[in-house]
Image: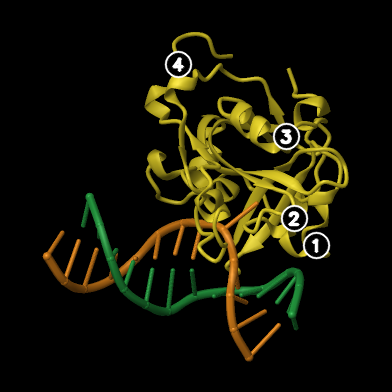
Chain colours: A yellow, B green, C orange
DNA sequence: TCTTCGATTGTCT
DNA sequence: GACAATCGAAGAA
């Protein structure tokens, strides 16, 4: 059920594509929240001029260079925590940024975390989903292949290629071409997900 | 519906 | 000291 380390130990684009439809699980004090992953972005190595590792390893981006299947959580714009899943073999800095989720369990707690926002906007942004699932600095470098950290991924639903959308990544206009335009943002419309019966 | 803009802090040069 | 893989409120249309 829980995704094994092998799942992450592959090229980042491959992992990003397959993360669509998987379930992100967050357990706090025995309370379980979960959501389908519906939007991601891939960041691939030091050559990728949009990747945090473009200038080599620093204290901040060190998790990118570590083992696949761990989280990389960092603060951006001084106020938003963004969560990534580290991929590729150890020593190669690549990760998938989670940008959007469709909540399944723990809706009450998620609603409380998101204030008065309507359900549509609970997890439709990388900073929002972190707020919704209470992901922050303490969740950096969590082992996603174990339940111990209270943050991990499980199998979800199959997402057919026909409903996968692609576009350039968001918020990286500082990056030169071709990286700025690579279609490494993948997402599905929550309405298009095949949710009829098959989910548990 | 779309656009603009202020908020706020860890990290790197 | 500058800037960042963003969000949400406010104002215009």
Q: Earlier in the sequence, mark 1 or mark 4?
A: 1
Spot the residue most to the front.
A178
Q: Give the residue at x 46% y 16%.
A: A195
Q: Give the residue at x 80% y 32%.
A: A9
Of the numbered discs in the image, which one, if any, rests on residue A194?
A: 4
Q: Which residue is mark 3?
A: A11
Query: Is residue A36 among what the camera can see?
Result: yes
Spot the residue most to the top.
A197
Residue A146, percent across and down?
A: 83, 30
In the figure, A5 relative to A173: above or below?
A: above
Q: Do the residues under discs 2 and 3 have CB atoms within 8 angstroms?
A: no
Q: Nearer the viewer, residue C12 or A8?
A: A8
Q: Which residue is mark 1?
A: A56
Please, which chain is the residue tagged with disc 1 on? A
Q: Do the residues under discs 2 and 1 have CB atoms within 8 angstroms?
A: yes
Q: Nearer the viewer, residue A154 or A45?
A: A45
Q: Give the residue at x 64% y 35%.
A: A13
Q: Give the residue at x 55% y 45%.
A: A129
């Amino acid at each position: 059920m829980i995704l094994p380390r092998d799942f992450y130990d592959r090229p980042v684009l491959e992992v990003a594509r397959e993360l669509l439809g998987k379930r992100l699980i967050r357990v706090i004090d025995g309370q379980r929240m979960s959501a389908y992953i519906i939007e991601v972005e891939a960041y691939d190595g030091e050559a990728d001029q949009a990747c945090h590792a473009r200038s080599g390893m620093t204290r901040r981006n060190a998790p990118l260079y570590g083992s696949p299947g761990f989280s990389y959580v960092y603060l951006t714009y001084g106020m938003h925590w963004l969560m990534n899943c580290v991929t590729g073999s150890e020593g190669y800095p690549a990760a998938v940024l989670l940008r959007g989720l469709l909540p399944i369990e723990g809706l009450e707690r998620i609603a409380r975390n998101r204030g008065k926002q309507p359900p549509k906007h609970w997890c439709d942004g990388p900073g929002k989903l972190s707020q919704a699932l209470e992901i922050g600095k303490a969740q950096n470098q969590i082992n996603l292949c174990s339940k111990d950290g209270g943050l991990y991924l499980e199998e979800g639903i199959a997402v057919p290629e026909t409903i996968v959308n692609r576009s350039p990544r968001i918020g990286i206009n500082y990056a030169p071409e071709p990286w700025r335009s690579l279609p490494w943002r993948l997402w599905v419309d929550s309405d298009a997900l095949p949710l009829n019966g098959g989910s548990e």
